[in-house]
């Protein structure tokens, strides 16, 4: 996972430019929608293509252009705090789940050699450290956001 900054998200826009005269230079925005998540855009892509097709059927000689693309969306402070809080809770859940599975494996180990000699033990330790680091990073980020909100501005 990528946890460098959560303040920015990729959002998408859709724009249909339409000119009844058939010239691109005379085109005006017929339909525009922004602030869409990638999942939302994929779910509703058919609708945007449908809107474009309706125009093409109604005005066969007109200039019609459907464009879509990404842009960076900077989250509002409250939404950003909620997002980091949700990521923190998810990381804590995954860390606890991994700890429980690891303790169960250690408790029920019945091989000849100890579990520390197993070839996957180093990978398991790295994964456990990764979960611990993610929780610490997210907790630090969440605390800094909460501290900024609690600090009075004069």
Image (spheres, helix red, strand yellow):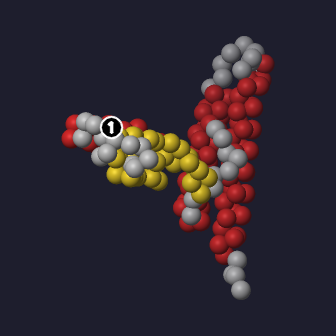
Q: Is any atom of residue 41 visible in this view?
A: no
Quarter assignment of residue 83: bottom right
- Name the residue furthest bottom: 154
> With respect to residue 90, does 149 lie above or below?
below
x 68%, y 15%: residue? 111
Q: Residues within 10 Å of mark 1 (few under 14, many from 20)?
A: few
- Determine whether the residue tagged by mark 1 lies in a helix, strand or loop: helix
Which is nearer the eye, 76 or 112? 76
Quadrant hosting residue 78: bottom right
For the N terminus, the image quarter is: top right
Q: Nearer the viewer, residue 29 or 88?
A: 29
Residue 72 in picture, x, y percent from top left: 59, 50
User: Residue 125: x, y in percent?
Assistant: 75, 31
Q: Residue at x 65, y 34 (%)?
A: 103
Q: How many marks?
A: 1
Q: Residue furthest left?
A: 58
Residue sitting nearer the eye, 80 or 20: 20
The residue sitting at the top extreme is: 112
Quadrant housing the C terminus: bottom right
Q: Is residue 146 left or right of residue 23?
A: right
Q: Position of residue 149 (x, y in %)?
A: 65, 72
Of 120 and 83, which appears nearest the observer?
83
Residue 6 in sight here: yes
Q: Tell me what residue is drawn at x 24 percent, y 41 percent.
A: 59
Relative image position of residue 55 (x, y in whole percent): 26, 42
Is residue 122 toward the left or the right of residue 3 in the image? right
Query: Seen in the image, is 97 located left or right of residue 114?
Result: left
Q: Can you identify the residue that label 1 sits on?
A: 49
């Amino acid at each position: 996972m990528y946890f460098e900054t959560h303040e920015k998200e990729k959002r998408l826009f859709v724009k249909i430019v339409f000119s009844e005269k058939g010239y691109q230079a005379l085109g005006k925005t017929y339909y525009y929608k922004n602030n869409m998540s990638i999942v939302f855009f994929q779910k509703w892509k058919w609708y945007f293509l449908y809107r474009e097709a309706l125009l093409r059927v109604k005005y066969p000689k007109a200039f019609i252009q459907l464009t879509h693309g990404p842009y960076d969306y900077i989250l509002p402070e409250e939404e950003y705090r909620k997002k980091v809080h949700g990521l923190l809770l998810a990381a804590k859940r995954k860390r606890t789940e991994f700890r429980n599975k690891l303790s169960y494996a250690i408790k029920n180990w019945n091989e000849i050699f100890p579990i520390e000699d197993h070839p996957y033990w180093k990978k398991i330790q790295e994964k456990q450290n990764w979960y611990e680091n993610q929780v610490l990073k997210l907790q630090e980020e969440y605390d800094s956001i909460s501290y900024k909100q609690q600090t009075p501005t004069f």
